[in-house]
Amino acid sequence: MYSETTDGIEIFVEPHYLDDQSEPEEHRYVWAYTVVIANGSTHTIQLETRYWHITNALGQVEEVEGPGVVGENPVLTPGDSYQYTSGCPLNTPSGTMVGHYVMRRDDGTRLQVRIPAFSLDIPDTARTLN
């Protein structure tokens, strides 16, 4: 599991290779990743936007950004957590993802919360990131 903390907001990420959705002979590799956002701050926060920087094994980069996560803009009071699962296809058998969320605090200020860099690797291969 990968983790990162920004101003008391902890982000945990656990990627999983989806063998049943991947087609290596067609250069299609698919991962699911589960994210837990834990609000350890003293503010109520709402997730507004997400940004992902995805790099495949050839160094090709795709950037993804947009509102919320999986169609939601969760609100977390202090001590709350939120979990969701999403996916990422690549055309190589490994890659990395890193990014951030923009959160709005109850006082109206915005905060960029870092998502830890994590490795997408097929099982039984060396990890790209430690």
Image (cartoon, grey):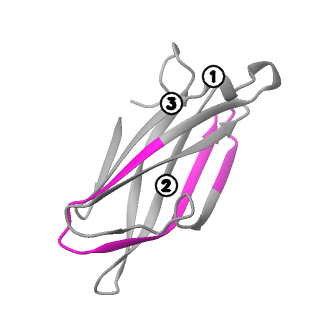
Task: Check residue 80 in the rendering and tell me which mark sits there, or answer none.
Answer: none
Q: Position of residue 28 (x, y in %)?
A: 74, 30
Give the residue number, with chain letter if any, for mark 3.
16
Q: Earlier in the sequence, mark 1 or mark 2?
A: 1
Query: At numbered mark 2, what does the secondary structure look like: helix, strand or loop?
Result: strand
Q: Residue at x 46, y 39 (%)?
A: 118
Between 13 and 21, the residue placed more toward the observer is 21
Task: Check residue 99 in the rendering and tell me which mark sits there, or answer none.
Answer: 2
Extreme residue in the right direction: 26
The three-letter amino acid code for the residue at tag 3 is: His
What secondary structure prevails in the magenta region?
strand
Q: CA distance from mark 2 to mark 3?
A: 18 Å
Q: Is residue 81 left or right of residue 30?
A: left
Between 41 and 73, the residue placed more toward the observer is 73
Check contact, mark 1 vs mark 2: CB within 8 A.
Answer: no
Q: Is residue 111 left or right of residue 107?
A: right
Badge count: 3
Query: At numbered mark 1, what does the secondary structure look like: helix, strand or loop?
Result: helix
